[in-house]
Amino acid sequence: AQKITQTQPGMFVQEKEAVTLDCTYDTSDPSYGLFWYKQPSSGEMIFLIYQGSYDQQNATEGRYSLNFQKARKSANLVISASQLGDSAMYFCAMREGDLGNQFYFGTGTSLTVIP
Amino acid sequence: DAMVIQNPRYQVTQFGKPVTLSCSQTLNHNVMYWYQQKSSQAPKLLFHYYDKDFNNEADTPDNFQSRRPNTSFCFLDIRSPGLGDAAMYLCATSRAISGGRRAYEQYFGPGTRLTVT
């Protein structure tokens, strides 16, 4: 079974609108971390936001927020007020366990912001 | 200031000619990773080091080797590159989890794009 599933290969959003990128995960470990990364066409992976399995509140970082629904095992990324520079690939990832050093990545979502 | 540095950014090698990619970090992180990423795909973990402990993924070809001489540096050696090894190679670092229930993120370098002719 896939550890991380991203079901949206491509998404379009109008500039200044909000967009939600979906991510579901699969783990039986009570301790895990969820991450979102942005990868522009230049290739560098940029860390955006983190949600811990024990965190009571949804994470927010500027225009990024994470809609964490633990019972549904989903960790959707919400980007508010989209900008042209947000056009990129977005990857959801998970790190399991207190001693887990391996990260599991989803297949990514390509976001295009339309002027 | 760059925290994870990869050299070179672009590497062209000939079919079958050994090549080494390098990665260095200024973060003093315990864990270093090498990923292979092909166009429009997710990064694929090749191996990682936790300090000096080497962890190879089961499906990483023997053609790929790695060395970590010290905390700061890690190398990826491709002994006999094939056309299918052309890809972006990403190095990343992370702190190890130490029971604090904080899963630390990875920091990535800019990548080395490998072309095999």
Image: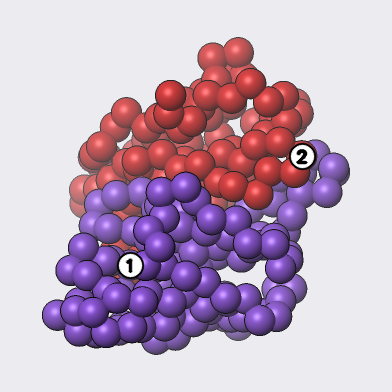
Chain colours: A red, B purple
Amino acid type of the residue that numbered disc 2 sits on in the rendered structure: Asp
Specify the subunit that label 2 lies on: A
Could you tell me residue B93's position as x and y percent? 61, 64
Q: Have a look at marks 2 and 1 and say if they share a chain.
A: no
**Image position of B41 (left or right of A28):** left
Provide the secondary structure element on which disc 2 rests: loop
Q: Which residue is mark 2?
A: A98
Residue at the farthest top position: A71
Could you tell me residue B77's position as x and y percent? 43, 77
Residue at the farthest left position: B117
Q: Which residue is mark 1?
A: B88
Provide the secondary structure element on which disc 1 rests: strand
Specify the subunit that label 1 lies on: B
A114 shown above or below B109:
above
**Image position of B10 (left or right of B24):** left
Residue at 28% over, 46% down? A110
Residue at 68% over, 26% down? A29
Q: Nearer the viewer, residue B29 or B81?
A: B81
Q: Nearer the viewer, residue A37 or A15?
A: A37
Could you tell me residue A35's position as x and y percent? 56, 43
Amino acid type of the residue that numbered disc 1 sits on in the rendered structure: Met
Residue at 41% over, 67% down? B64
Disc 2 from disc 1: Cα separation: 30 Å
For disc 2, the neighbor class at 10 Å (few under 14, some 14 to 19, many from 20) is some
Residue at 49% over, 51% down? B57
